[in-house]
Image: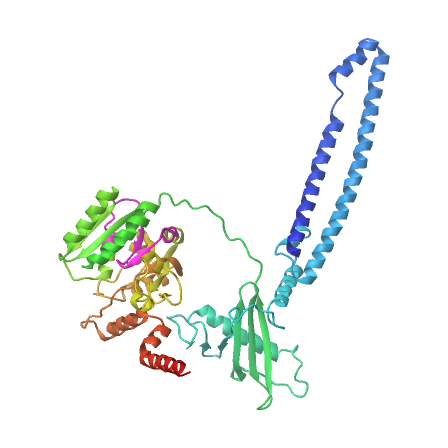
């Protein structure tokens, strides 16, 4: 409430200043405006054009008129200055009051003074005062607490792990390692410096071996806090140091408009058999890509001859019913290889236009919002987009308590019980054809299922291109029965089986299936007890 009042006051003062400027300009124009031509003419005619008295009378009147305007203008300027000074004083008092309460909106101080180094230091101090460092804050529920990560010199113990991270691991990113080790080095510098006077009896020289563990967490609008524990002088003595890395004000990096009207997406799908799944994919393609978006091309790379006539029939039917003809069907008379199919589909585009590619699987469901994200997050020579899709659990397990399964649209919801973010998969990606070719494309030596996407992903990570990796609420992996071929090598077979297990149901749902007999026995026992009562 106070912030809104303060901003309203600033707006009113701005209007007063604008009004003052307009009044000054108006008064100046009025003061400089000559007497009307008609009045001059009447005065001249009264004494004759050559009359000295007529000219003297005209000059006297002009002098009186100017004196009147000057006096009026001076008076009104003085009144406006007084009003402006009063409003400025009110604004200054309001700013001081807001600053003491720690609720001054970012950037508002720049309205009345030029920022200095001391201002920045004061801003950082206010960030510390607002952060949950020296005292706790009231939280609305147990879900709003930001947990700490625990770390030592070798390991980070983290709560939010995801599927590709472990509860305890060495920091993978160099900046994360530098951040944590840097906090320990800063603490050692403080503890061993002359300004640290806690050890009045005897001086203790701290070393990295004295570091026991640390806690760290980040409040996204304020900064990161580090609570570091060191050994003290005795076995039961410890030294604790709290550090805070404040976040600075938000800075504008760039502002640009992006026109996506001419950005055509070439959706490349490798396929072998699975005609029923392809029909479901085409239904989604017709609704979203043709009817809603209209700026796409579909390239299907089909391996083998079996069922290819049915695939052609599906595409022909789509053309007849929608008049959409932007298809390319490529037949490969060789063993299925996802990487090989995507590579052939990407290079098949012969036009000069640098096409935006979306590598897709036949069991993927897209939305119009995802197509927009694909266009905005990929940029030739600069960025490639690796969306994290939402993978659906087995509907027969999720909705086992229902007689009929919900419709497909009703199943496409992002909930813990219905699926998971597939953060270990890198197969769906948007990049421009030029970047794909310059990076070297897929590894053609990889056959069958798995690892071809990881190899391409690593190539981009090792390049100078920026990899945009983020969850996409408009991209779904539809559940399907997964079979792992016995011909796969042991590492790929194990990876395939792990993926199959993760895709069936959540931990809790699998637990209910595993302990189904015990649960039923308990429910029957409760029913019998209620009957006896």
Is residue 70 at all visible to an observer of this figure?
yes
Q: What colour scheme has been applied to the protein in the rendered image?
A: rainbow
Is residue 114 at all visible to an observer of this figure?
no
Left/right placement of residue 315 relative to residue 90 reads left
User: Residue 113: percent from the left, percent from the top?
Assistant: 68, 52
Which is nearer the eye, 59 or 274?
274
Vertical arrangement, residue 201 with respect to residue 407, above or below? below
User: Residue 157: percent from the left, percent from the top?
Assistant: 46, 77
Q: Residue at x 20, y 70 (%)?
A: 485
User: Residue 365: percent from the left, percent from the top?
Assistant: 31, 56
| Quarter placement of the C terminus | bottom left
Residue farthest toward the right in the current orientation of the protein: 53
Left/right placement of residue 88 relative to residue 509 reads right
Vertical arrangement, residue 449 with respect to residue 77, above or below? below
In magenta stretch: residue 195: no
User: Residue 135: percent from the left, percent from the top?
Assistant: 63, 73
**Extent of the magenta region:** 344-372
Q: Residue at x 26, y 71 (%)?
A: 496
In magenta stretch: residue 362: yes
Q: Residue at x 58, y 73 (%)?
A: 243
| Quarter placement of the N terminus | bottom right
């Amino acid at each position: 409430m106070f912030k809104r009042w303060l901003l309203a006051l600033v707006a009113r003062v701005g209007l007063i200043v604008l009004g003052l400027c307009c009044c000054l300009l108006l008064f100046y124009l009025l003061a400089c405006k000559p007497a009307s031509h008609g009045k001059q003419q009447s005065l001249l005619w009264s004494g004759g054009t050559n009359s000295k008295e007529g000219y003297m009378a005209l000059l006297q009147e002009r002098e009186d008129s100017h004196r009147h305007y000057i006096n009026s203008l001076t008076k009104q300027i003085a009144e406006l200055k007084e009003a402006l000074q009063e409003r400025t004083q009110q604004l200054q008092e309001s700013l001081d009051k807001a600053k003491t309460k720690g609720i001054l909106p970012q950037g508002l101080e720049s309205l009345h003074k030029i920022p200095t180094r001391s201002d920045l230091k004061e801003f950082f101090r206010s960030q510390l005062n607002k952060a949950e460092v020296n005292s706790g804050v009231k939280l609305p529920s147990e879900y709003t607490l930001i947990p700490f990560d625990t770390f030592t010199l070798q390991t980070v113990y983290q709560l939010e792990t995801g599927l590709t991270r472990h509860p305890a691991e060495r920091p993978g990113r160099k900046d994360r390692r530098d951040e944590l080790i840097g906090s320990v080095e800063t603490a050692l510098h403080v503890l061993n410096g002359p300004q640290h006077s806690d050890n009045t009896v005897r001086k203790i020289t701290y070393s990295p071996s004295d570091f026991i563990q640390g806690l760290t967490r980040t409040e996204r609008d304020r900064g990161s806090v580090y609570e570091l524990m060191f050994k003290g002088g005795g076995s039961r003595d410890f030294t604790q140091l709290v550090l805070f890395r404040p976040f600075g004000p938000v800075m504008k990096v760039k502002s640009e408009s992006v026109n996506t009207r001419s950005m055509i997406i070439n959706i490349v799908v490798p396929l072998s058999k699975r005609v029923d799944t392809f029909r479901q994919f085409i239904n989604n393609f017709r609704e979203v890509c043709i009817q809603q978006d209209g700026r796409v091309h579909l390239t299907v790379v089909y391996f083998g001859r079996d069922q290819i006539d049915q695939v052609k029939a599906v595409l022909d039917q789509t053309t007849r019913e929608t008049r959409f003809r932007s298809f390319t069907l490529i037949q490969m008379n060789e063993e299925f290889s996802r990487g090989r199919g995507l590579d052939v589909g990407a290079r098949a585009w012969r036009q000069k236009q640098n096409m935006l590619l979306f590598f897709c699987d036949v069991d993927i469901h897209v939305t119009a919002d995802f197509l927009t994200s694909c266009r905005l997050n990929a940029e030739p020579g600069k960025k490639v987009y690796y969306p994290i899709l939402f993978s659906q659990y087995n509907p027969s397990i999720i909705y086992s308590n229902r007689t009929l399964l919900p419709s497909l649209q009703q199943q496409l919801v992002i909930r813990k019980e219905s699926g998971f973010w597939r953060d270990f998969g890198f197969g769906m990606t948007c990049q421009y054809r030029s970047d794909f070719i310059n990076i070297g494309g897929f590894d053609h030596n990889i056959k069958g299922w798995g690892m071809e996407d990881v190899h391409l992903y690593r190539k981009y990570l090792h390049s100078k291109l920026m990899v945009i990796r983020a969850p996409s609420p408009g991209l779904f992996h539809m559940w399907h029965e997964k079979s792992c071929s016995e011909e796969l090598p042991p590492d790929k077979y194990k990876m395939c089986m792990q993926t199959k297990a993760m895709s069936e149901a959540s931990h809790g749902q699998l637990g209910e299936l595993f302990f189904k007999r015990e649960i039923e026995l308990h429910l029957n026992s409760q029913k019998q007890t209620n009957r006896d009562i």
